[in-house]
Each structure stands twice: as C-alpha cells, then as structure tokens.
Amino acid sequence: MTDSSPTTDAAVAVGAADSTADARVLVINSGSSSLKFQLLDPDTGTVDAAGIVERVGQEQGTASIAAGAKESSVEGPVPDHAAGMKIVESLFADVGLSLADDRIRAVGHRVVQGGARYAEPVLIDDQVRWDIEDLGKLAPLHNYAAVSGIDGAKELLPDVPHIAVFDTAFFTGLPEAAANYALNREIAAEYKVRRYGAHGTSHQYVSRAVSERLASQGRDVSELRQIVMHLGNGASASAVLGDRAVETSMGLTPLEGLVMGTRTGDIDPTIYFHLHRRAGIGPAEIDDILNKRSGMQGMCGMSDFRDITTAVEAGDEAAILATDVYVHRLRKYLGSYTFVLGGLDVLTFTAGIGENVPMVRERLLTGLEDLGIELDLEANATRSKEARVISTPASKTLVMIVPTNEELSIAQQAVAVARSDA
C-alpha cells in the first residue's frame, strides 16, 4: 500500500489557530492491555495531565489521572481501548479539564509497528488506519490496540488532526545487511520477515539530545558514533552513526535482543520446537512463556530491578545469576555495536533501569578501561533526573545518562505534522 496524508478541514482549522503559543497535544499510547495518556505543551514539555487506564479487555479495570494537585481514579469494566478513551474523557472532567479545550491542536498516537511503509509520522486518514490494522499481523499485541485507541480518540476529538508516530520509524533506514535475516528470500519477502526494531522514538530522542548537547559545545557530530541502551521492562540497544540508526537489537518483534523483564531476548529458535516436541507445549503457551514468563521474572521471580538489587545485595543466588545473564548480554551488544560503528564516541543509558540502577551500569562497564571506557563511580551512584556524564575526564568514550521523553517527542512530531498539513 502507499502512504496517504490528505489535508483535512480539521487540520486547516488547527493550523490557523497555531499562531498562539498556548498549544497542547494529547498523546495516546494504547498498549496491549493499557492506555496511557498525557496532555502537554510540545514547546516547553510542561505536562498538564497524565494518567493510565489499566486492565483493558478484562472484567474489571482501573483508571487514574493526575493534573497538578488534582487526582482522580475509577474502577469498572474496560472492554476495549475505545471504551478506555471515554473513561479518559470523564477523568479529564473530574480534574477540571476538557477534551473540548481548543488549545488541543493535535492528538499523537504511539503506534508500535509501521513496517517498511512509514519512516515518518503521518496524519491518520482511512488509508493509514487500514495500514496500521494490516500491520497488526506483525505486532498483534499492539497495533490492534492502537487502532481501537485511534477510533475512540477520533470519536471524542473529530475536529482535531490525529497523527501516528511509529516506534519502528527510526529504524526503517537500517542498512540492508542489518535489516535482513538469513532466511529464504522468497519466504522473507512474502511474509515481510525482516528486522523492524522498536523503541525507535526513544532511541531517536536520546541520540538527538546527545548530538545537540555536544554540538552546542562546538563538536562536529556529523559522524558521531553512539550506542543507546534503552533499559526498561522492555529493553533494546541501538547503534547510531551521525543521525542515522545502523543497528538495533529488537527484530521482527520486540522479543529479539537483550534480556528483559519478562522476555527472553535472543534465544535459539529450536528451543520452540524442543518445548513443543518434548513437553507437548502448544504455540500459544510457548509464546506466553517466551514473552511473559521468562527474562528476569522467569530466572529469579522478580522483574523490578529495585527488588533484584536488594536480592543481589542479600546474596540471593537466583538474582545474582539472573543479573549476570542480563549484564553478559549487554556486554555482547556493547562490543558488537562498537565494531559495527568502527569505534565508540558516546554510550548513553536511558529508561527506567538505564537511568536509575547504578548496579547494572557499574557491572557492565567495570574492567573496560583498556577499551577506552572509564566509569566515574561517584557520578554513577548519584541520583538525578537531569542528563549527565558518568564517565571520568580520562575516558575516551563519553558515558551519559539521558532521561528519555517519548511523550514529548510524540507531541512535537504530531504538532509538526498538524502544522505542515495546514
């Protein structure tokens, strides 16, 4: 299918109103069983309201919102993401806000899978909606939820442009050697099997933030060699040369790559057949094991690194081994991506674990001094919400922590599309 982004009357009206500096963007992130939302200023990053609807599709769901000092929460059935959007509308009313606020100039939707079709954010029309649903074949847990959220949001905000921002977009330009699997090419082409990556919005935001910081210091960043490690419950790494991603750890799906909270990451594919043949486990259960019952949770019974750190310090053998496996995988990717780039100028950590767990960073980087990476242990142990350097002045490779802000990135991209289509 071809991309299509026709100008709508709503976009024209919104663009005309954009002469004021008081614009807001509603960011919607429809996950497999949740719907996160933020109302924010795309220019300053100020968040007016944020919340989440949880347990979508279950008999009893929960939802909450925080807007400054005001908070509200509700419980009840949430049959789908469209119903979740109606709950969001009522939560806004509870804290004195309204989705009818004319400051809302765009709605930005996080969409996990854009395939090879979408390298940029795009205004959602009927064709784009169809494409997102069709690409659900590659990301069934996420894209179908995104479509439901889009439908619900459009019903509530029909006169505001809705923009899809794709998690895979940053990786559509991967070199062919990195994007392709060594699979029979006819089969790969017919079933669109290739490496699409994920967390691209975060990797793009963080790598650009690093480049802008260094450029402001007078450094030439046109060929800057970066590795970004987005370490949260889901985890991924990327190699970025200049402003272009040249490698990423997630593949056809978010299962490939690093060890994660509940996902295995890289695994011998014949383990699937082994479990099926020897244990009689069916495809659905194997998928559940690999994605939801493995990783740190499967190895030590915990996925929260606050609990894991405490357990490691207490000498828990399962937690120690799980952490060793986690860090070993990180080291493999750090080494291989450094070679892909031909060297390394900056290594950056982001997301919940990357930003907040000194133990992981210390275990990963200790002993790499001869390779040009020297960690400042005091800086590494210091807690801060600011972007900061945690390597020593003598380190040839700059090591940084840069808090990610996917919602702000989505908001900025969404309002840019809304204005350009006006």
Image (cartoon, rainbow, N blue to C red):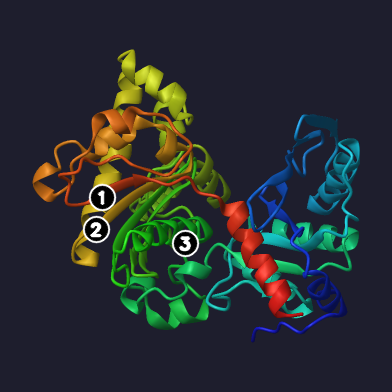
Distance from disc 2 to disc 1, alpha carbons, whole Å, reads 6 Å
Give the vertical position of 126 relative to 57 (above or below).
below
Contact between labelled residues 1 and 2, with CB atoms less than 8 Å apart: yes
Q: Earlier in the sequence, mark 3 or mark 1?
A: 3
Image quadrant in which the C terminus is located:
bottom right
Type of amino acid under label 1: Leu
Residue 337 image position (x, y, % from top left): 26, 59
Q: In the picture, residue 162 is in which quadrant?
A: bottom right
Mark 3: give few (<14), some (14-19) or many (20+) Cα within 10 Å: many
Instruction: Report the residue at 45% width, 22% height from top.
Output: 307
Residue 125 visible in the picture: yes
- SS of the residue under disc 2: loop
Question: From the viewer's perspective, is 345 left or right of 119?
Answer: left
Instruction: Report the residue at 82% width, 36% height from top.
Output: 59
Residue 322 image position (x, y, % from top left): 34, 31
Q: Nearer the viewer, mark 3 or mark 1?
A: 1
Residue 198 visible in the picture: no
Question: From the viewer's perspective, is 325 left or right of 38?
Answer: left
Mark 2: give few (<14), some (14-19) or many (20+) Cα within 10 Å: some
Q: Which residue is mark 1?
A: 398
Instruction: Report the residue at 14% width, 38% height from top.
Output: 367
Type of amino acid under label 3: Gln
Type of amino acid under label 2: Asp
- SS of the residue under disc 3: helix
Distance from disc 3 to disc 1, alpha carbons, whole Å, reads 18 Å
Checking the image for residue 345, the label placed there is: 2
Q: Earlier in the sequence, mark 2 or mark 1?
A: 2
Q: Which residue is mark 3?
A: 204
Along the line of sight, which residue is nearer the eye, 60 or 93? 93
Contact between labelled residues 1 and 3, with CB atoms less than 8 Å apart: no
Residue 254 image position (x, y, % from top left): 49, 55
Contact between labelled residues 2 and 3, with CB atoms less than 8 Å apart: no
